[in-house]
Every structure is written in C-alpha cells, then in structure tokens.
Image: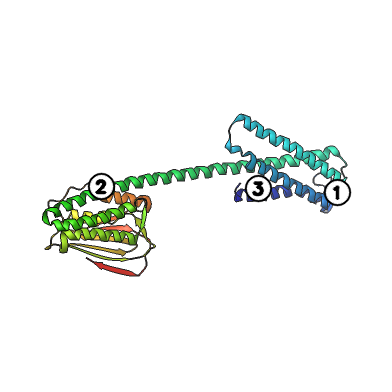
Amino acid sequence: MIKTEKRVLLLTSVFVAITLNVHRLFVLLPGEARTIGPPWVFNAPELAFQVLFQFGFCIFFGYLNLKLLNWNKSKNRRKMLMYILSNSLFFILLLFIGSATQKFLFQNVLNLKLFLWGYFFRLVTSLGLIAILVKILLLNRVQKRKEQENEQLKTAYFDAEIKNLKAQINPHFLFNALCSLSALVRENPQKAQDYITHLSKVFRYSLGNHQEQLIGLDKELELLDSNIQLLKMRFEEALQVHIDVPRTKGIRLPHMSLQPLLENAVKHNYVSKEMPLQIDIFQENGALHFRNTLNEAVYKEPSTGIGLLNLNERYNILMGHSIEIEKTEDHFTVKLPLNPLSHVHKHRHY
C-alpha cells in the first residue's frame, strides 16, 4: 500500500465509524427528536467503544484486501473463493468479538436480538462501504500501472527512434568527409594528413557521446569548431564563420544538431575566395539561428534530404518542437528552438 491509499483508508474509516454511530447522539436532543433511531440510553464510554471498534473494523478489512489479499493480482476462481471465504470468516469473528465485548463491558443489553441485529447492520454497512473503497483503489492501481507501462513503452520507442535517427548521421557525415578528403589528397597531401587528424577527433567525440540524446550547447559548439577546422583546411578564406551565442551550461539540444547544417551549407553552395560562404550563428527570440549566404552551386551534389529531415524528427521527439526554415534570395536560415539563454556572450570568427 502506498501512502495515498493509507491516507484514504484512514479518512474513510473515520467517516464510516462516526456516520454509523452519530444517530446515538439524538437521545440528547429535546422533545420528539430523541426518539429517532433504536431505543438506547446514552452512554459516552459505550459510544466511544462502538466508534473505535467500527473504525478498527474498517481499517482491518481495508488493509486485509489491499495489502494481504490484493485482489487485482489474481483472476483465479479458486483464489477468489478463498478471498471471499476469508472475508466472511473474519466478518463473523469480528461480529462475535465486538458484540460479546460490548455486552461484557457495559452489561446494559435489554434486547439481545435487537442488539445483535444492530451490530450486524452496522458492520455489514461498513464492510460494503469499505468494499467499494477497495474496488476504487484497486482500479486506480490498475490505471496507474497501465500509465507506467505506456510511459515505459513510449520511452523505449523514443530511445529506439533516436538511435535509429542518430545511426543515419554518421554514414551521412562520413560520406561527405571522404569526398572532401579525396579532393585534398589530390591537391595537398600534407593538408590531407592534418585533415585526417581532425577527422579522427570529430569521430572520437561523436562516438564518445553516442548514448546521449541531448547535449549541452557548449559541447555542441566545440564539436562544430572541430568541423569548421576541417572545412577551413579545404576552403581557407573562402569560408567565413561568425558565432555569437550565449555559452551557458544550462542549455541542451539534440546531439549533432549543428553539424548537418554546416555540411548542407557547404555542399549546396558555390564556395570561392571571390564569393566566400558566410555563416552566422546567433541567438534571437529564444532560438538558435544558423544562417548562411545563398549562392547555390550549378553542379551541386544531389540532396538526399537526410540532414534536415533527420534533425527535424529528432527535435520533434526530444524537444516537442519543429525547426523553422527560412529561405530568401540571399540567405538560408534554420532556427533551432531553445530555452531562454543568459546574456553573457562570447564571439568567434573564422
């Protein structure tokens, strides 16, 4: 039994015990009102005994059925009959104990038949009310258990979905990286060696955080720095990146959110010293903006749509929001929703 169930059982038992004995106070009223209910001479100790006994009766049967028998754990007919038989035997036993104890202690029973029927009526009524309470609490248990199972299934589904989506990133990134490396090998073997060194750092970082679904903004920007260094080795001054965002530890976003945006900007645009690709990353209106100049390449690589589609799906699952995309004649902007950020900024230029 959990604390809430114990509290509800306690309060219900108090209510039932008082309600089924409150009519005995009518004998204290003036006039004809004192005739309400069965005849009885007011006796405070006897009234207190009956209230306490009925309270204990309710507590006992509530605890018996919620804790010891726990009806909802079995639908076996034989066990159900055993449960009913157990309740019946305890009922008869407590009826005998209560009536015999009260008769012995107070020695004021004038009509034994009426006395026993009164006891029987009060205890049966109490048992019926406690049975209703037990049924409600057991149904509540079942409902909570279903909600927990659904939450576990939902979490398991999200985990599997995230792993599947993140699995698409590494092959996509590797494909783009190998294309760049192939070009560097022909142009500058020494740069190609440095490129491989930086590439190994990127993969070490990515694989080292493969279990994380959300990652700190600072760490994500560190990963972006490594990727920028790789691209700068190829494009040099033709690639210009300006980062102006809060560097706070309290902000988290899906792992590897910025890398596909950087890849797409380079892949789909013509990059040269005469027409450099300019990328601005900044925070505005509760979102992280990734904006790049738009100078679409005539012979660009065919787009698979994995990068932005994957990122949007991961944002929907982990953050409950979709990314926003804006495209003008001069710029292409992707907005990643974030929580409110601090006002302490750091600036970087590449």
Q: Can residue 256 be seen in this snapshot?
A: no
For badge 3, the amino acid type reads: Leu
Residue tagged 3: 9
The numbered mark at residue 41 is 1
Residue tagged 2: 171
**Label 1 neighbourhood size at 10 Å, few (<14), some (14-19), many (20+)?**
few
- Of badges 2 and 1, the one in the foreground is 2
Q: Find the distance from the CA under tag 3 to the CA under tag 1.
A: 31 Å
**Label 2 neighbourhood size at 10 Å, few (<14), some (14-19), many (20+)?**
few
For badge 1, the amino acid type reads: Val
Q: Secondary structure at mark 1?
A: loop
**Label 3 neighbourhood size at 10 Å, few (<14), some (14-19), many (20+)?**
many
Residue at x-position 22% and y-position 46%? 304
Residue at x-position 37% and y-position 67%? 342
Image spot of residue 289 (x, y percent): 28, 61
Q: Secondary structure at mark 3?
A: helix
Mark toward the start of the polypeptide (2 vs 3): 3
Image spot of residue 291 (x, y percent): 24, 60
Give residue 272's quadrant in the image: bottom left
- Of badges 2 and 3, the one in the foreground is 2
The quadrant the C terminus occupies is bottom left
